[in-house]
Image (cartoon, helix red, strand yellow):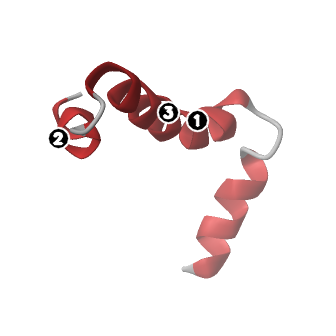
Amino acid sequence: MFRLIHSELLKMRHTFALKLFVAAPVVTLGLGYFLSGNFVQFTAYNW
């Protein structure tokens, strides 16, 4: 199983998809914090 995951990560190594995979949750939490202040977790779940 590790070999399959490793091969998929190698395929996506220099693509935008890997960056998007990391950036999407960070942006969602950032917007939740910016727009709602104290209710970040609640807002992030709704988004």
User: Who's the residue at 66% across and 76% down the image?
Assistant: 3
Question: Up-down: is 43 above or below 8?
Answer: above
Task: State yes or no: discs 3 and 1 in contact (Cβ < 8 Å).
Answer: yes
User: Who's the residue at 61% across and 79% down the image?
Assistant: 2
Mark 3 secondary-structure assignment: helix
Q: In this rendering, would 21 be left or right of 40?
A: right
**C-alpha span from label 3 to label 2:** 17 Å
Mark 2 secondary-structure assignment: helix
Q: Residue furthest top?
A: 35
Residue type, numbered disc 1: Ala
Front in this rendered view, residue 17 or 34: 34
Quickly name the residue at label 3.
24
Q: In which quarter of the image is the N terminus?
A: bottom right
Q: Which residue lies furthest to the right in this view?
A: 14
Q: Which of marks 1 and 2 is nearer the N terminus?
A: 1
**Disc number placed over residue 42 in the picture, else none:** 2
**C-alpha span from label 1 to label 2:** 19 Å
**Disc number placed over residue 23 in the picture, else none:** 1
Q: To which quarter of the image does residue 37 belong?
A: top left
Front in this rendered view, residue 40 or 6: 40
Q: Which of marks 3 and 2 is nearer the N terminus?
A: 3
Question: Up-down: is 6 above or below 32?
Answer: below
Query: Looking at the picture, how far across and down is residue 24, in whole percent?
Result: 49, 33
Residue type, numbered disc 3: Ala
Front in this rendered view, residue 30 or 2: 30
